[in-house]
Amino acid sequence: MNSAGLQMRRHEELFPPVILSTLVTAVLAGAAADLAWEGWARVVTPLIVGGPLQPAALVQSVFGFQNWFWAELIHGVVGVVFYPLGFLFLARPLARVVTPFLPWWVVGVGFGLGLWVFALYVMAHLIAGLPAFLGFIPLTWASCAGHVLFGVVTAAVVRMREAR
C-alpha cells in the first residue's frame, strides 16, 4: 500500500463516514444521553443537593436573553446533535491517536469531563463571567457527575450502533 493509501486507511479508522447513518447514530446517542442527563439533573440532583441543575440558566447568562424556552431548546439541540458529533469527530479520534489502549467507557468518561470543563469553565466563567466552576459548590460536582453520565451514555450508544 502506498503512503496515500495508508493515510486514507488511517483517516477511515479515526473518523466515521459522513453518511446519514452516522448522523442517526449521533442523534440517537445524543437523545439517550440527554434523557439520562435530564433525569440526573432534575430528579437525582435535587435529592442530593437540594435543587436541580438548570443549564438553561447558564445559556441565558451566556447569550444574555431571558426566554427560558429558547434557552432549554438551545441546550437540548446542543446535547442531542452537536455534542455527540463532537464525540464522533473530535473526542474519540483524539483518544484513538493519543490513548488507543483506553476502553470505550473511559473515553466516554473523558468526554463527559471535557464537556463539564467546557460548560463550567469556558461558558460559565470565561464567557458569562461567573466564578470558575461556580466556585466548586455542591452543584458543581452534581454537574460533573451529570456530564460524565452524558459522556458514558453517548459512548455506549455509539458503540452499540457500530457493533450491529
Image (tube, rainbow, N blue to C red):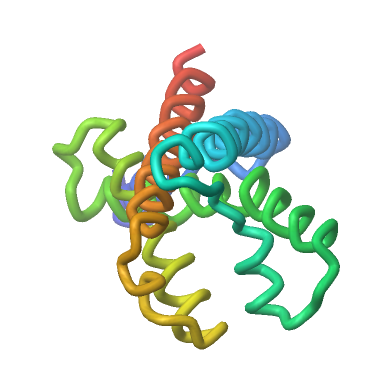
Q: Where residue 17 sits in the image (x, y, percent)?
A: 57, 40
Q: Residue at coordinates 47% horizontally, 41% vertically from top-left?
A: 45
Q: Where residue 127 sits in the image (x, y, percent)?
A: 54, 85
Q: Where residue 6 sits in the image (x, y, percent)?
A: 32, 48
Q: Which corner quadrant of the image does residue 74 belong to? A: bottom right
Q: Residue at coordinates 46% horizontally, 31% vertically from top-left?
A: 153
Q: Which corner quadrant of the image does residue 18 belong to? A: top right
Compare residues 105 and 2 and report the one nearer the observer: 105
* Whether residue 91 is situated above or below residue 44 in the rendered picture: below
Q: Say whether residue 20 is left or right of residue 49.
A: right
Q: Is residue 14 visible?
A: no
Q: Is residue 163 visible?
A: yes
Compare residues 69 and 13 and report the one nearer the observer: 69
Q: Residue at coordinates 71% horizontally, 72% vertically from top-left?
A: 60
Q: Say whether residue 124 is left or right of residue 13.
A: right
* Whether residue 130 is situated above or below residue 141 in the rendered picture: below
Quadrant of the snapshot with the N terminus = top left
Q: Residue at coordinates 49% horizontally, 29% vertically from top-left?
A: 158
Compare residues 75 and 133 and report the one nearer the observer: 133
Number of marks in the rendered image: 0
Residue projecting furthest to the top: 164
Residue projecting furthest to the front: 50
Q: Where residue 27 sits in the image (x, y, percent)?
A: 67, 36
* Whether residue 121 is situated above or below residue 15 in the rendered picture: below
